[in-house]
Amino acid sequence: MTAPPAPPRLPAAAGEETTAVAQPQALSSARWLERHATSLMGTYGTPQRVLVRGEGCYVWDAEGRRYLDLLAGIAVNALGHAHPLQVAAVTAQMATLGHVSNFFATPPQVALAERILDLLRAPAGSRVFLCNSGTEAVEGAVKLARRTGRPRTVCAENAFHGRSMGALSLTAKAAYREPFEPLPGQVTRVPFGDVDALRSAVDTDVAAVFLEPIQGEGGVVPAPAGYLAAARAITREAGALLVLDEVQTGTGRTGHWFAHQDPALGQGIVPDVVTLAKGLGGGFPIGALVALGEGPSGLLGPGQHGSTFGGNPVAAAASLATLHVIERDGLLESVRKVGAHLTEGVLSCGHPLVAEVRGAGLLLGIGLRRPVAAAVCAALLEDGFIANAVAPDTLRLVPPLLLTVEQADTFLGALPRALDLIEREIP
């Protein structure tokens, strides 16, 4: 793969020589972090590293150390970093037409909406609203549900649907919600996977049920077999919408274009609404709210929703390139193969700290017998691997979809070392 072009010169901080920052590598991580602390809000805490370059499944920090990226921007960089086809597509589109208002249409916008509907096997009358993120897609779904005239929404315990006020009302984690309460809407939470609890909660006052096929931020927890099919039957009977949040699970992440198309999860259901983002743009900000069928697609009319940058031609070009490469290079099959290899390798290492592996494809959670996931991730980072402690006892792996078996094997070799280190250091 051809290395990405050198980045432009960066401005110096006050008191620094401009020549000292001709490239981002010219400053140490410590200096970048000093500047970070005095210029950015502290909403994410202290960064673990300062990353300056990426290629394929690898990234490099300001000191030139290389890391295998098993987080991919939290399931975003489907094609890894600096994929040549995506770079070419974005560059060509930016050189042709970068942005117009939504008073006008562009060919990439239309082509992307058609492609999404095709991949979803959408019924006649389906429509797409393009936006910039998963939170925005969910926010749109919340507004769409409001248009039914029904007052209540049902979602699952341990769910994550975003951090804007409407999406946050559906997100379970108290630390995210409580500082901003009261939140809009009447929301009922039910245990994820409990069909009886869902049936009891859904009546003719419910506008929509929001579910993730696999709870990503909730610890990589797949819906039990038959649960989504039961949710489809329950919502249909009550006349409520079934909204599937595929922001993290969509765009090939599980080895299927969308997780609900996996026979083990979806059993052939057709939801009313699907929300997409993350991997859809392969690293470029984009999201999509997809209403399936004439009824759901007619709920939002002119002027009732909008986004300045939603569906802009550069983002659409990035997404079209991402989808093309996934199909052209057979990445859905590769995701299933490499995901199975990782799962088998983690389980067969036989380490006493490993309890299980959950998930599908390249959305995997390594369940640990002790709440030491953050420490394990820190040890892996020192060894050149980026993973994520999504829960105190769970490591999350969401690498680029082009991860190879050979690259996976380097992680499988490093994991026991990290686990051994934590066992020795944490009594």
Image (cartoon, grey):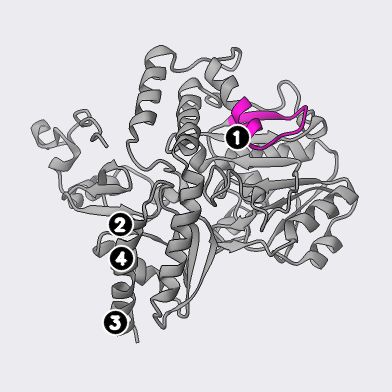
C-alpha gap between disc 3 and disc 1: 45 Å
Q: Nearer the viewer, residue 179 or 367?
A: 367
Q: Callout 3: helix, strand or loop?
A: helix
Label of residue 288 in the image = 1
Q: Which mark is residue 425?
A: 3
For disc 4, the neighbor class at 10 Å (few under 14, some 14 to 19, many from 20) is many
Q: Circle 4 sits in a helix, a strand or a loop, which is it?
A: helix
Task: Examine the structure image and report whether residue 116 is included in the region drawn in magenta.
Answer: yes
Q: Are marks 3 and 4 in contact (CB under 8 Å)?
A: no
Dot 2 corresponds to which residue?
A: 48
- Find residue 337 and report its horizontal and vertical position in percent: 47, 55
Q: Which residue is mark 4?
A: 380
State which quarter of the image contains the N terminus: top left
Residue 223 magenta-drawn? no
Q: Amino acid at mark 2?
A: Gln
Location of residue 356 with respect to 427 vertically, above or below: above
- Secondary structure category for the residue under label 1: strand
Foreground mark, 3 or 4?
4
Drawn side of residue 67 relative to residue 164, left or right: left
Q: Which residue is farthest bottom?
A: 427
Lower position in the chain sequence, tag 3 or tag 1: 1
The residue type indicated by label 4 comes to Leu
